[in-house]
């Protein structure tokens, strides 16, 4: 676990107790802080209600804990449990909206908390209390860690593949490395790296919004396309959030930026004074990807170029980089080859939740049976239109199915399948040897599935069940 001596004796309110929030609570307590935590989901509160740390109750009857057990008199801790430093750990459960926040050193919120409309954000600002996230706490902990470097990767699309590839290159080179951040691995719960290690962080715009002092040794921006606009005052504000990763950076540290879209190119131009410390990745660079089985398509060419630039900035030998690109196996739900059956390749790209992230997948294959649809983030498929010539037939599912079928009608053959099982069965009947059945929905999953992982897993099971 990563902790900072700066937290000792301080008081923090933590809102949101999913993976990163729960890890934040545990790290702050281990660092000697007092923590008041809250999540509207009682199950998440209960998950933290273990014998150590001890709990104090707020707003509950005597003898009632978040876990439904007993702890004694409300507001009083159980018999002391000591931290490794000999200090008492105290965890209180209370909704920060009901508290006077002026007594806290910071409000730590999970990235999923919408700062633009959640009332606790305005309350914290009015009280002069900093609003931060777990990445900022990691930045505060860095001086106490063994000498290391940090790579931060942001962008609308391709982040997870790129950080995983960077981590794989470093591991291949024998460099101690640790993945964390938006990829689903809370950085504070990771074990500290030894001297010379590299922390590789996937950073969403939400995480960057909650960070003030993270000085990445290498900062990467892959691309910026419209997404998450419900959290920002327009597209320019979303792009500005991404740009803050470089504003926090020392001017002599490496900046790597894909310039395939106008906002990213503008950010690169604003950093032109960095000269040799700035690397620009132009779109459409011709590369031989035939030796990289898990890095197909133009989008993965860009991801690979970014990872190569990072590895070069960190001094990894070219021969090691080449070997790692060949051995990289890719990530589930991201252009994942599930099966080849009777000459037909089935590909799970469930992570493609907007048209911009689906377009590169359509460009990666010649003859595609395209399964798309779900909870749409956009009312059009304009980003995908240049690749419609690769689509043999489309199969629409979910809430957006009728609308997307209407858009595609007259351009490519289309069936309104309605659900994933019907679409997979139809695509399997129609596909010929050499074709690809591609789940790349261009939509969020929440109309029919728990999340994009659930959607991808159901696709995998359906494909594996084909006779």
Image (spheres, rainbow, N blue to C red):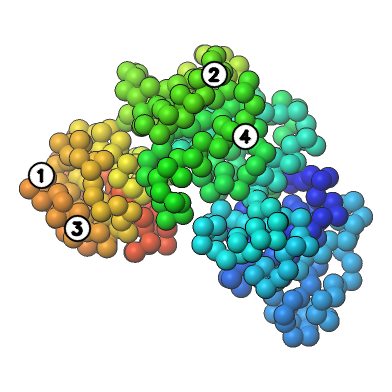
State the SS at label 1. loop
Residue 219 versus residue 74 in the image, above or below: above
- The residue wearing badge 2 is 273
Give the mark, 4 or 3, whose residue is nearer the N terminus: 4
The CA distance from mark 2 to mark 4 is 16 Å
**Which residue: 65% across, 51% down?**
132
Question: Which numbered mark, 4 or 1, is in the foreground of this view?
Answer: 4
Question: Which numbered mark, 2 or 1, is in the foreground of this view?
Answer: 2
The CA distance from mark 4 to mark 3 is 42 Å
Residue 116: x %, y % from top left: 51, 57
In this orientation, which residue lies closer to the viewer: 128 or 120?
Answer: 128
Give the mark, 2 or 1, whose residue is nearer the N terminus: 2
Residue 416: x %, y % from top left: 16, 59
Residue 337: x %, y % from top left: 34, 40
- The residue wearing badge 1 is 411
State the SS at label 2. helix
Give the mark, 4 or 1, whose residue is nearer the N terminus: 4
**Do the residues under discs 4 and 3 have CB atoms within 8 angstroms?**
no
Pointer 3 local density, CA inside 10 Å: few below 14, some 14–19, many at least 20: some
Pointer 2 local density, CA inside 10 Å: few below 14, some 14–19, many at least 20: few
The CA distance from mark 4 to mark 1 is 46 Å
* Residue 201 occupies quadrant: top right
- The residue wearing badge 3 is 403
Q: Is residue 267 left or right of residue 93?
A: left
- The residue wearing badge 4 is 248
């Amino acid at each position: 676990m990563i902790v900072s001596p700066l937290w000792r004796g301080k008081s923090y309110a933590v809102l949101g107790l999913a993976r990163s929030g729960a890890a934040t609570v545990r790290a702050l307590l281990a660092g000697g802080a007092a923590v008041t935590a809250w999540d509207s989901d009682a199950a998440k509160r209960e998950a933290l209600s273990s014998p150590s740390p001890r709990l104090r109750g707020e707003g509950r009857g005597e003898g009632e804990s978040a876990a439904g057990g007993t702890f004694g008199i409300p507001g009083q801790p159980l018999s002391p449990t000591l931290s490794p430093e000999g200090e008492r750990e105290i965890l209180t459960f209370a909704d920060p909206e009901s508290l006077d926040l002026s007594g806290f050193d910071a409000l730590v919120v999970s990235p999923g908390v919408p700062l633009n409309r959640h009332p606790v954000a305005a309350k914290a600002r009015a009280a002069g209390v900093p609003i931060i996230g777990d990445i900022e706490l990691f930045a505060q902990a860095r001086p106490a860690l063994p000498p290391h470097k940090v790579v931060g990767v942001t962008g609308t699309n391709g982040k997870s593949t790129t950080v995983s590839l960077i981590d794989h290159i470093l591991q291949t080179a024998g460099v101690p490395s640790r993945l964390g951040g938006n990829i689903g691995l809370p950085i504070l719960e990771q074990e500290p790296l030894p001297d010379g290690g590299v922390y590789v962080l996937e950073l969403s715009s939400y995480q960057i919004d909650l960070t003030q002092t993270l000085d990445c040794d290498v900062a990467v921006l892959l691309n910026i396309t419209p997404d998450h606009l419900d959290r920002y005052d327009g597209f320019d504000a979303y792009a500005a959030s991404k740009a803050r990763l470089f504003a926090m950076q020392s001017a002599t540290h490496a900046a790597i930026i894909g310039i395939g879209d106008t906002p990213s190119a503008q950010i690169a131009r604003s950093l032109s004074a960095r000269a040799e410390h700035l690397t620009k990745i132009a779109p459409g660079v011709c590369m031989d990807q035939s030796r990289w089985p898990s890095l197909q398509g133009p989008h993965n060419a860009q991801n690979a170029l970014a990872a190569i630039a990072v590895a070069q900035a960190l001094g990894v030998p070219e021969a090691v980089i080449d070997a790692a690109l060949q051995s990289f196996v890719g990530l589930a739900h991201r252009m994942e080859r599930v099966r080849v059956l009777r000459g037909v390749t089935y590909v799970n790209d469930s992570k493609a939740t907007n048209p911009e992230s689906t377009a590169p997948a359509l460009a990666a294959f010649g003859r595609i049976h395209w399964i798309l649809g779900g909870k749409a983030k956009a009312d059009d498929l304009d980003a995908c239109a240049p690749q419609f010539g690769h689509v043999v037939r489309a199969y629409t599912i979910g809430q957006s199915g009728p609308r997307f079928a209407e858009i595609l009608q007259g351009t490519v053959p289309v069936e309104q399948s309605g659900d994933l099982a019907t679409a997979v069965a139809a695509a399997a009947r129609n596909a010929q040897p050499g074709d690809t059945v591609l789940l790349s929905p261009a939509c969020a999953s929440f109309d029919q599935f728990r999340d994009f992982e659930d959607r991808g897993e159901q696709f995998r099971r359906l494909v594996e069940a084909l006779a």
